[in-house]
Image (tube, grey):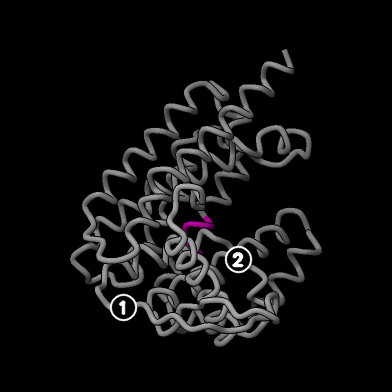
Amino acid sequence: MTIEKNELKVREFDMYQAYYCGICKSIGRRFGQLPRMTLSYDSVFLALVLAGLSEETDIVLQEHCITHHIKKKPVVFGNEALDYAADVMVILAYHKFLDDWKDEQSKVGLLGKSALSGAYGKLQKMHPEICHKVEHSLTDLSELERENSGKLDLVADTFADIMETLFIGYDPAAGSAQVLGQLGRHLGKWIYTIDALDDYEKDIEAGHYNPLIFRENKLEGIGDLLYNYLAEASNAYDLLQIKKNKGIIDNIIFMGLRVRTDVILRERTELNEQSV
């Protein structure tokens, strides 16, 4: 879930990067240096949306970091939504490593889950309900994978449960919680399906589970599903009252996700043509 950089203003791109660096700093400050290695741009979108519901001005400072130790970079500080997005990033990263270790006996998975176990223990105390719901949904997802389920809607919907939990979890009592939940749910379906499509050939070769492999119609109609998920996510997003950084979020929702979908569908079409 990234930006379409060429369509952003310079100041918007700088703020986007400042949120990314802010999440990285937040993880390091509260959980140590190793968990910072798990950072991805997906967390920036969550932080931007949640922070965008508030009129509170972003505090941006110029700071050094471990990867940019010579030139200072803008970093967002003192943002509760950003800290929450950092927490979510570590929760998901821990479970990704744990899953890799359980399913594939991956050494990287073992090292990753070991490195993040302390941070995850803290997060279980900070966000007990969120961690419980995520663990429950992941258990359901693992069961579907063990069954080699070809029911793409069911599998994607189970992953969407996780995303809905995470989008609502920041402030479940807020008036926008239901809309945020729907935004997270439809984005979750899109993320799971686009990843399955992107990894289709690789998973076949490696013998890894992918619902598209076992789906009755294989790849038929996948494009329609993906664009429908994006349309539903856009509809939910339009109901939110975004008060700041709207240009960046609009860029991701209406351009970045669409471009990503177009690219993977085109690559999949080309691969299919080459195999015929």
Question: What type is the residue that disc 1 sits on?
Answer: Thr
Q: Which mark is residue 57?
A: 1
Per the image, label 1 sits on a secondary structure element best described as: loop
* Relative vertical location of residue 135 with respect to residue 22 in this rendering, above or below: above
Q: Main secondary structure of the magenta part?
A: helix
Residue 182 lies in the magenta stretch: no
Which residue appears at 64% of the width and 68% of the height? 38
Q: Residues within 10 Å of mark 1 (few under 14, many from 20)?
A: few
Return the residue found at the far top: 276
Residue at 30%, 58% in the rendered image: 180
In the picture provided, is 148 more to the left or to the right than 234? Answer: right
Say which of 27 and 177 sits in front: 27
Indicate the position of residue 45 as horizontal and vertical percent values: 44, 60
Of labels 2 and 1, earlier in sequence is 1
Furthest residue to the left? 175
Magenta-colored span? 135-139
In this view, 194 is above or below 34: above
Q: Position of residue 75 (x, y in %)?
A: 50, 78
232 left or right of 114 in image: left
Q: Is residue 14 left or right of residue 114?
A: left
Q: Residue at x 67, y 71 (%)?
A: 37
Which numbered circle lies on residue 93? 2
Please check the rendered image and state whether residue 136 is part of the magenta-colored stretch, yes or no: yes
**Which residue type does callout 2 highlight?**
Ala
